[in-house]
Image (cartoon, rainbow, N blue to C red):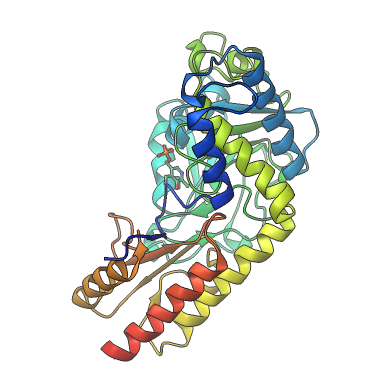
Amino acid sequence: RERNQLNFSGGPGALPESVLRQLQEAIHAVPEVGLSILGISHRSDWFAAVVAELQSNIRGLLGLPPSYHVLFLQGGATQQFSMVPMALLAGRSRPADYLQTGYWSGKALPEARREGPVRVVWSGQACGFGRLPRDEELDFASDAAYLHYVSNETVEGLQFHRVIGRDEVPRVCDMSSDFLSAPGEFGRFSMIYAHAQKNIGPSGVTVVVLKDGLLDGAPDAMPGFLDYRRQIEAGSIFNTPPVFAIYAVLLVTRWLRDDVGGLAAMGGINAAKARLLYRALDRADGFYRPRAAVPDRSTMNVAFTLASPELEKRFLAEAEDAGFSGLAGHRSVGGIRASIYNGLQLGAVEKLVGFMDDYRRRHR
Ligand code: PMP
């Protein structure tokens, strides 16, 4: 078995080499501090500067003004499924609009229903989550408490290539699997959240970006840890935060800005990677069967099946032997999924395409 595996996993994903090297050094000792990152106080001036720079880097990359708060929270994206309706829905009479476009947006639904009324604007369940809604199929309420959707469905490989919803209703978006992967109209969202472990770091930290004023009217009595207002006041240091994970995200944002050249450049590279893979699927005469409808294909998660479970099992085993790790589809749907997050290089995708073409020739 190849010892240096390329990471095509749905998450945690690959991180850039230069970031891994800096982290390796930081585990031994952060140069400007002389201590291991694993033992630096979250109350130190050094960490305060890390948090401040990271907030500013994220605003800068997203093109957002200082009126957006940037928080670093724990509990993953899953905790946001609850924190969002606890703040924006509990005690309100107007329903929140939710889209059910796949596995992860579906997971957000029961958590929201626990807090208040929810209206499912559109569900892809009937079509097996093979596509996203077209604009004509979406009838948004003009007085919804907010709209919640997932910009990239990690499991099914479906991605919105446009912003949806009404401008007068706050948009709340789970961007966990396409955060900082390409430019976008981020100022049209009232809240964006994304865990780190796909495009921007290790697990343990979730980035939450929210517009000032969004929390006016949130219930008074909330557990402090789960109350965005308390987290804002504490500057994300409400309790001991994951210092290592936050530092890793800082290094990735520096890499994105200085080495890659910003989100436009990153988006170009990610689009090129996705094009290569989809082309390999499309020229395979049905040997590989893409899951997602063509207009909704994700640039991050390329999901497909083969003609039989045996062919898929063999594909995965041979791929692993050849050095391609993490290609098994999500346990809920099976099949194959190649995840090609920011840290995975074009050369890795070229190698995978070579393997796929060869596998097809041998098993046709
Ligand atoms: N939302 C999306 C889009 C995801 O892909 C995932 C996990 N892969 C989650 C939410 C859940 O994230 P976590 O494990 O950080 O709670």
Tell whether 109 sits left or right of 329.
right
Instruction: Decide: is 39 above or below 291.
Output: above
Q: Quadrant of residue 21?
A: top right
**56 relative to 261, above or below:** above
Outermost residue on the right side: it is 65
Q: Nearer the viewer, residue 312 or 16?
A: 16
Q: Residue at x 27, y 80 (%)?
A: 307
Q: Is residue 241 left or right of residue 330?
A: right
Identified at 73% across, 25% down, the residue is: 212
Q: Quadrant of residue 234?
A: top right
Residue 337: image location, x then y, percent = 39, 64
Q: Is residue 132 visible?
A: yes
**10 displayed left or right of 221:** left
* Tally of numbered tags: 0
**Closer to the camera in the image, 113 or 353:** 353
Quarter of the picture containing the N terminus is: bottom left
Identity of the residue drawn at 48% across and 65% down = 131
Q: Is residue 95 visible?
A: no
Q: Is residue 352 above or below residue 262?
A: below
Quadrant field for ligand 1? top left
Q: Looking at the figure, which quarter contains the C terminus?
A: bottom left
**225 or 114, which is in the foreground?**
225
In the image, residue 79 lies at what x, y percent?
44, 30
Q: Position of residue 95 (x, y in %)?
A: 54, 33
Q: Residue furthest top?
A: 221
- Residue 122 percent across, percent down from the top left: 50, 53
